[in-house]
Amino acid sequence: MTSRIQSAAPGSGEQASGRPPYPAESPGNGRAPGRPARVSLDELHETARRIAANVERVLVGKPDVIRIALVTLLAEGHLLVEDVPGVGKTSLAKALARSIDCTVSRIQFTPDLLPSDVTGVSIYNRQSGDFEFRPGPVFANIVVGDEINRASPKTQSALLECMEEHQVTVDTSTYHLDEPFMVIATQNPIEMEGTYALPEAQRDRFTARVSIGYPDQQAELAMVDEHAGHNPLEDLQPVSDGETVHRLIETVRGVHIAPEVRRYAVDLVAATRGVPEIRLGASPRATLHLVRAARAQAALSGRDYVVPDDLHTIAVPVLAHRLVLTTEAHAARRSATDVVRAVLHRVPVPQGSRP
């Protein structure tokens, strides 16, 4: 399927491979009817490498950010890119979308955007005498939401159902979204004029949040040399497709996570709820997202099992944006990232017995 871009406006810690430190379960070859076949870890790693290399042609010198984006994609999650203007937030989202040959749509969030501009609307057909549903831009495999915090909370809430349940309900009718489905949203946390803070329910539906940051001097010089006279997005070609990504996701679902590591993930999330600096800790949904992201991180590292280092690698991107700090923590210049790192140091790491 050829990738297509649509616009909607108002009125329209890599770990080396080795023997598992925890007993591994046999993944088996069977799969539920209707599910795509799994691929080997070698094929998954090679496909992810091609996608990452393609994105890096646009976003120079940020391999860690691209890695988190791939982890989120393979974990069946959604990505929030939060940073100052001009560092490549939208470029990252569009480059990842164009690297996969699937349906892609882009929504420019503005204050006068309506929920129906996102989900779609039922229109009366005078010839047939019935209402016909016209799908909105959310009906795509990858949805790029630019400056999501510029839309009103009413419009932002149009994404809640589709992000969590992969479906849209309009006029009592439910329409299911195609798989894979991923929302990549951007926002500027500095400029607050004319913006609306994301509700906690909305932030909790994003699997991970990344901040791109400024490039180092060498990367910025390379960017000037290569991008000053030409936009690399124009020449970006797909290196994978939606069906292949669906098979990669199925492979990630089969990555083994031992009971000790599952318990460790639960302990990490539960620990955020008892920190004095935190007014609202991470939710049970955060535990599920942490485990799914850890599976994807392990698969990208060439392993079919999860180790505690996988949880450590993705803990900050997965957990920090969900925490609500107290006024005292803000006054002490403590950040949610600081709190998550403190929790990682405080919660004991499980010691598995090597075979």
Image: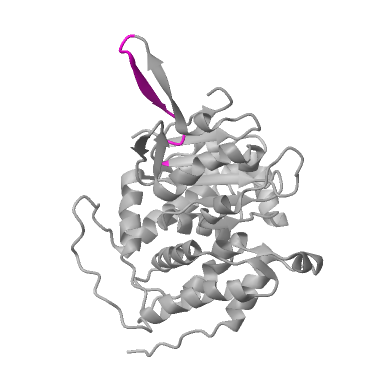
Q: Position of residue 192 (x, y in %)?
A: 75, 44
Q: Position of residue 102 (x, y in %)?
A: 38, 39
Report the residue at 38% width, 25% height from top: 133
Report the residue at 64% width, 32% height from top: 110
Report the residue at 64% width, 77% height from top: 342
Q: Position of residue 338 (x, y in %)?
A: 68, 71
185 to the left or right of 259: right
Q: How is the image coloured?
A: one colour
119 to the left or right of 81: left
Position of residue 318 relative to residue 226, above or below, is below
Q: Residue furthest right?
A: 331
* Residue 234 in view here: no
Residue 315 versus residue 176: which sits nearer the camera? Answer: 176
Position of residue 253 relative to residue 120, above or below, is below
In the image, the segment drawn in magenta is 127-141
| Secondary structure that dominates the magenta span | loop
Q: Quadrant of the C terminus?
A: bottom left
